[in-house]
Structure formats: structure tokens, C-alpha cells
Image (tube, coloured by chain):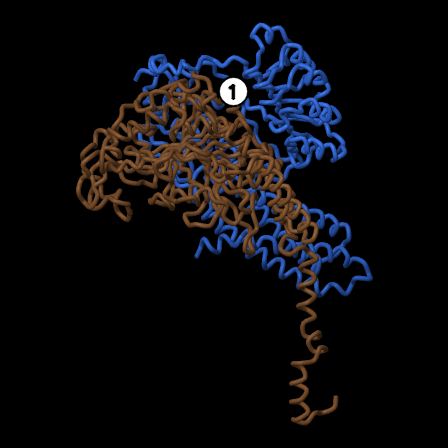
Chain colours: A blue, B brown
Amino acid sequence: MKTFIAHLHPLLVHLPIGILLVYLLLEYLRRNEKYKLIAPINTILFFIGIGTAVLSIITGLLNADVSTYPEDDIFWHKWTAITTTLLFTLYFIIRNRIFYQPVYVIGFFILLLFSIVATGHLGGVLTHGENYLSFEDDIQPEIQPLQIKNIEEARVYEDLVQYIFNKNCISCHSAQKQKGQLRLDTYQYVLTGGKSGQIIKSGDIGHSEMIRRILLDESDDKHMPPKGKLPLRDFEVQLLKWWVQSGAGNQQHVNEMGKDSITAMAIKQFHQVFSQQSAPIQVERPVLNKFDPAIIKQLQSIGCTVTPLTQQENYYRIVAFNAKDSIYSVMEILQKIAAHVVELKLSFTNANDSSLQNLSKFIHLEKLWLDHTEVGIVGLKNISNLKDLKYLNLFKTNLKETEIASIQFPKELQLISPVPKDTLLMARDSVMVSAIKQ
Amino acid sequence: MRKLNIHQEAKKVSLEFQTRRHFLQQCRTGMGMLALGSMLDGCNYFGGDKENTGLLNANPLAAKASPLPGKAKSVIFLHMAGAPSQLEMFDYKPALQKMDGMDCPDSFLQGKKFAFIRGVPQLLGPQASFKQYGESGIWLSNHMPYFPSIVDDVSILKAVSTDQFNHAPAQLLMHCGTARLGRPSMGSWVTYGLGSENSNLPGFVVLTSGGRNPDAGKSVWGSGFLPSVYQGVQCRSEGDPVLFLKDPNGIDRDMRKASIEAINQVNQVAYQEFQDPEILSRISQYEMAFNMQIAVPDVMNITDEPEYIHRMYGTAPGKESFANNVLLARKLVEKGVRFVQLFDWGWDSHGTDPGTALDLGFVDKCRQNDQAVTALLMDLKQRGLLDETLVVWGGEFGRTPMQENRDGKQNVFKGRDHHSDAFCMWMAGGGIRKGFTYGETDEIGYHAVNGKVSVFDIQATILKQLGFDHTAFTYPFQGRNFRLTDVFGKVIEPVIA
């Protein structure tokens, strides 16, 4: 019951804020002769406002008792609220009973306005956090890539555990915000724990509150990190378990601590995943105008499949399997829309050097399939102008390695070489040797 | 108003049931709403995706853009019907070895239903030896000697769960998103959404390795309520690849062409008159069938593959086998087929006879499977196709850590019962992370401990890689929008590169 009443606080607080603000406004207007008649209404308004303010304070005090907000933050909110209520009462008494002088009234207005806004803001900071009301657009904290070359020499706490805390936890558990009175931004704070005591019992994952919370079912309210926050990956959980299990120290290096195979793999995964900055692969292409849809009809009529790459852009993937014998006409038509072609699949067709003579017009071409065709070195030379080309398939063409090497390809081109690798290697034996010895 | 006597009032009431004026008066709101409804395009007005109705497109199999950028263009789904034992292939449980022969603890049995296990079964240790392989250090059993060479290209899901423990419903769940009949299969959804890049071949091909068809029957590649154009075309690796495709005796190709043209002209006239888009799809079907007469036998012929390919896959032309089908799958994908569905059989290792014994028949299955599957991934890779082809491998559920005791008696051979709580599947290519394992089971491989994924999650992930948001990819049927994943499913982000 107590909790229920306490939790009414966030609901109730809006009443005195709104009512007392209206009261202030009307009080200001009342100075004008025209609005003199407001006076009795305003008195009613004042009593409702103060009544709800008192109720808010009572529920607020209860809420401070049952909630987990840090004592320091509550302190200011509590006292500004009480002061505001007292100031309003004071104003009411002075205004109506004792004396009335416009200068004082204006000064009082500003004071009251300020104190009511301050109280509300402090309350808001408690529930929504300090950065909620900010002029900056919401920016997801960037995950810095790990700067560790050799993971075996990394420090377990500093480089691994704290890295995970920084990434997943400190948005709620740090100097800015201490949900559950817990901070995880330094080792000392981690050991200190939070509202429900210590969160780590070194060497005992079964009795470590932090591990227990992490392992709870995702649907559980107490699960950490909570819903909507960046979840921990399995290997991260494994690392945290391992760190607690092996003493939760802050001195050891990875290679000084014993580990089982699962942990070893988790460490490896951790290193792999976070060392590389994952650059989003977002291709920026200029906006192109639409072209005559009859061209697409034409291409389709000779057997080409024309697929828009996305539903919005005017870029296309052309597949010519069924235009096998009419590649010449395909290329003739395609020339007209060359800038729109991003992927071109000429596999299994009779494409040859002369089919590719106008290839340099395809300035946005990113993927080109020439596998199982008669294309030779003369045709291939037209490719060197294609700056965006990322993938070139030459499988089962008659090109020689030396010929291919003579061509300057764009950087980072994925080249599928014409000669099938000797896959007979399927070499069971060599694979077996490479197996990691347990 | 003039007061009516009782007679007049009765007459008025009876007239109210008959007159036009009264009728119009009474139903103006209803009529108005009906008119408004049709003007607002029915329930589709709010958020309905008009482009997704499929039928409006003249050729239902025309290639379409995916709603989101997708990494994969085609899918090869290798289904090991019968459910292979994860404990002898991917999920290494040394603790289970130590507990071999012990009675299964009660906590694992309470409230559980098994297909065959009765009473208290005994735990059965892994019937294989395991080692870590590759850069990624993934555990693999000795039954898969080839797999290590591609293990760094796959993502293994170690804690897949389903809620069905019988073959047919579990297979339906895996492919159609529900354990009951009547829903479209994944391949149908995908061809419906993306069309086909090769108009001479079906967009969705199904290959079975001979022997038995999957328990769930042809429904696992059916089109459900989607237009039947999208249903899987079963191709046989022996005899005619597609039944009834060959010209009948005495009719040559020109004659066939002439007759199809005549039929299509009639259809065209009918279309002019009725404007029914289904007629257009019928026309395109006739044309495709005609083209397929040449294209299908060509692509389904593996005899002209070079010798090294045959050795690599372990194929023997002219027979029905899993290896042949795997090679065919590669050929089909290479030619632009959107979804290839393979069903292998004989994985139901109960241990009732040598063929289903974990130390006998199962080992043979693993070996056959291993070589072909490894060859497939290597071959796709060397052809530069693996980036655009998503390969998925798995059964419909897993197998118990306990030895099966059918009707309370220990089976003669070593075998395991059906297990739905945790099993392994893997994915490769098509933008899937390389050399990665996701999920973990408890010490004996009974429950998922973390990284638990459901069958719906797998479906959601496959759709995601093809460029669909599985929650938005719908088809209206019987008054509501249907999804492959129904109301479930979460994309398995960790396995996406």
C-alpha cells in the first residue's frame, strides 16, 4: 500500500505545477482593473494548488523512502518543493492580508516562477536522467574499438571488464546517474556495490548479485542490462563470469589467469568483435533521373531480368541468363541507361570482348559477372575506368593469370579468378593436422 | 402530428417494411459506410501495402526489388529430415560422457513428453570424438572429416529450439511457420517477394534424395494461400527432372509451340474481356513451361560437370543421391534460381536397427553429408557465389541426451529420441558471420543456457538476409495479414556479419 501511494507521486506532481502556474498568471492579470473580478476564483485556485502540492510532498517523501534514487539528488528536489509551497503560502498571506505593493509582487512572481520550474526540473532529472533535456540531438555513445594488439597481454579488469561496463552499463551506473545507487565507472565503485549491497562476491558467481541479474531471463524485470539497452553478448557474459570466478581482481593480465576452453574462445571473440571498427557499408550514389520505362520493357523482351536495387532509387541489377545469344543488343540498349546499372550479370552468355567495348560508360557499376563467357583481355581493359567496381567474377573464362595481373583494378576489388582452385585438396589429412590440439 | 388509430398505425408499420423510402432512410448510414469503405480501399487504407498483392503484376515471377537492401539473393536450405543428432556432430558435451549409463535425473523428465522414451531412460555419452578446428576453434566431431576445411565460413547455432517433437509438425513449423497445414512455405514466400531472376527456370526448386519424402509431405514446399505459381517445383535427379514436362509422343516442339501460342491467344482474348490478372499468370506459366523444356534438362544434367567436381562432391551421375542434389543446388543457384530446398532422409537415429544406430548408420549419413556439403560451400566460394547465396543446414529438431528406451526397454542399438529443447543448425554465406558459434547448452546438452533461438528466429534471419523485415512482409488472406513468422521471431543479429 505504501509503495502504491508513493508511486502516485509522478502523477500528482503535475497538478500543483499546472494549477499554481495558472494561479500566478491570473494573479498577474488581476492587477489590471479589467480583470478585478478574478479575485475570488483565484483564491479557490490557490487552495486547490496548495492542497495538491501538499499531497505531492507527502507522496514524494514516501517515494523517496521506497525508491532507489541517490540521496543527494533527492535532497534538492525535496527542499525546493517544500520551499516553493511555503513561498506560495507566504505570498498568499502577504498579498491578501498584510499589504500590497506592486514592486514586491513582481519580485515575488519571478521568485515563485523560478522555484516552481526548478522543483519540476529537479524531479524530471531524477526520473529521466540529466541528459534527457538537452539541446544536443540524441547521440548513441560510440563504442571505441579496442586498442589491444595482443589480447593475452591485456589487463583483465581494465581492458576487458571495464570495457564491457563502459559499453553496456555506465549509461545508468556512473557519476551522471546512479540507478540502484550503483556506479560501475571505477573498480572501487564496482567493489562497493549498490543499494542491495555488494554486487560481486569474488570467486563465487552463485552469490554475486551482478552475475545473477545478468543471467536472469530477459523478460524478468530485474534482468540487466534492462530491456531497450544494449544487451550483453554471450561471450561478454562468459568473460564477466570468469573474472568474478577467478577473484574479481584488477591487477591480473589475461595470460596470468587460468581459463577453460569456453573462456578462451570468449576472449578470442571479444578481441575479434571489438578490435575492428565496423564501418557501416552504406553506398552513397547520386540521385538519378527516371528514364523511359520502354527501355526496361525492351530489355525484358529479349530475355533480361531487370530488378531495381531498392524500391526507391533508379538503380538496377541486370541479369542476362536468358538473353544468352543477344548480348550485343543487350549492351546496345543498356548503354542508354548505363549510369543506372549497378550490377550486371552476363554469366553463361556469349559475351565477348566486343560486348564490353562500351563498358566504361557504366560509371556506377559495382558488381560484374563475366563468368562462363568468352571475354578476353581486350574486353577486360575497359574495366579499369570503373572506379566503383567492387566485385568481378571471371570464373571459367579463358583469361590467364598474367593477363589479369597486367590490368590495374580498382582498390578493394573482390576478384574471382578464372582458374578453379584445385579443390581436390579437400585434403582431409592436411585439415586434420591443422586441428587445434587439445 | 396527427394521432393515428391502432389500425392506421399497424398499416404504417407494415408499410415501413416494404417501402423504398423507408429502406433508404434506414440504411443510409450503412450504405454510406460501404461506399466510404470502398473509396478508402477497404482495410488497406491504413498502412496496407498495395504493392505486395503480387497478382497485380503481369508476370507473377518477375524479379522484384527487396524492400530493404539484402545481402543474399538466393537460398539453399539443406534439410536433414529425421533430425540429426547434434550431440554427435556439433555440440560437444564431455560431461555427458562421464555420466554415460547413469539414470536421467528426474528434473529433466518432469512435465516432459517424448515421442518414444518411457519411464526413466539412461544418459548416453557422445558417440563420437571431438576436436577444435580452424581459426575459430569450433568443436566438430570425427564423423565430419571434411567440414573443418570450411568451418571458418559458417555460423553455428547451438541452441535452436522448437515446440514440436514429431517429424511432420516440426518440419511444417520449420518451413511454413506453423505446425499445422495450410500455410505457404518459406520458399514460396521468398519467390513471392522477390520473383525469379531466370524466367526459364522455376523460382523455387525442391530436391529430395530418393528413399523417403519428408513426413510432412509436399506441404513443406506448398504455397498455402499464396498463388500456386509460388509453390516449390520438385525436380527429380533421376529420369525426367520435372514430370509431365516432356512433349507427349508424336508431338514435336514446333507443334507444341503452336498449340501453346493458340492457347495463349485465347487466354489473351479472355483477359481483354475480363481483366482478371490470374489469366495473365496462366499465360506466363504456359510460356515458362515451354522454356523449361529446354532449360531444365540442361541445368539438371550433371554429367557434363568436370571430373574434379564429381570427386569433390562425391557424386555419381544417374543415381538419386544427396550429393547429386547438392551439386544440382549449386547449378540451380548459379543459374538464378531463388530458393533451393533439399531434403535428405535417414537421420532419425532411434537405434532400433543398424541403419538408425548412432555408431553405425548415422556415421554413414554424416560422411555422405559431410563431403557434399563441404564441397558445396567450397565450390560456391570459388565461384564467387557464396556472398549472395545463403546456405542453411539443419533438421527439424534435435535428439535427447538420453538413450532411447522404446516402451521402457533399452533399444538394441545406440540411439536417441526426438528432442525439441536444444539442437544445432548452421548458416553460411549471404552475409552471415564467418567462423562463429552462437548459443550454448547445459552440461549434457538438454536445455539452452544462453543464445537460445527459435525456429521463427531462423526464419526471420533468413528473410532479413534476403532484404525483408519479417514483421512487414505479409499477405492478406481471409481478412487479415499473414506473416511467415506469424507473431513471433527475432532476427538473430549476432550471426549477421
Q: Residue at x 43, y 50 (%)?
A: B181
Q: Amino acid at mark 1?
A: Arg
- In the rendered image of this protein, does residue A61 appear above or below residue A355? below
Q: Nearer the viewer, residue B416 or A242?
A: B416
Q: Residue at x 55, y 50 (%)?
A: B481
Q: Is residue A52 visible?
A: yes
Query: Tag 1: Cα neighbours inside 10 Å, few (<14), some, or many (≥20)?
Result: many
Write down the chain letter for disc 1.
B
- In the rendered image of this protein, does residue B10 appear above or below residue A369? below
**Quarter where residue A15 is shown:** bottom right
Report the side of A284 relative to B231 (left or right).
right
Q: Nearer the viewer, residue A234 or B352?
A: B352
Count of picture labels: 1
Residue assigned mark 1: B383
**Quarter where residue B388 is shown:** top right
Q: Residue at x 43, y 17 (%)?
A: B307
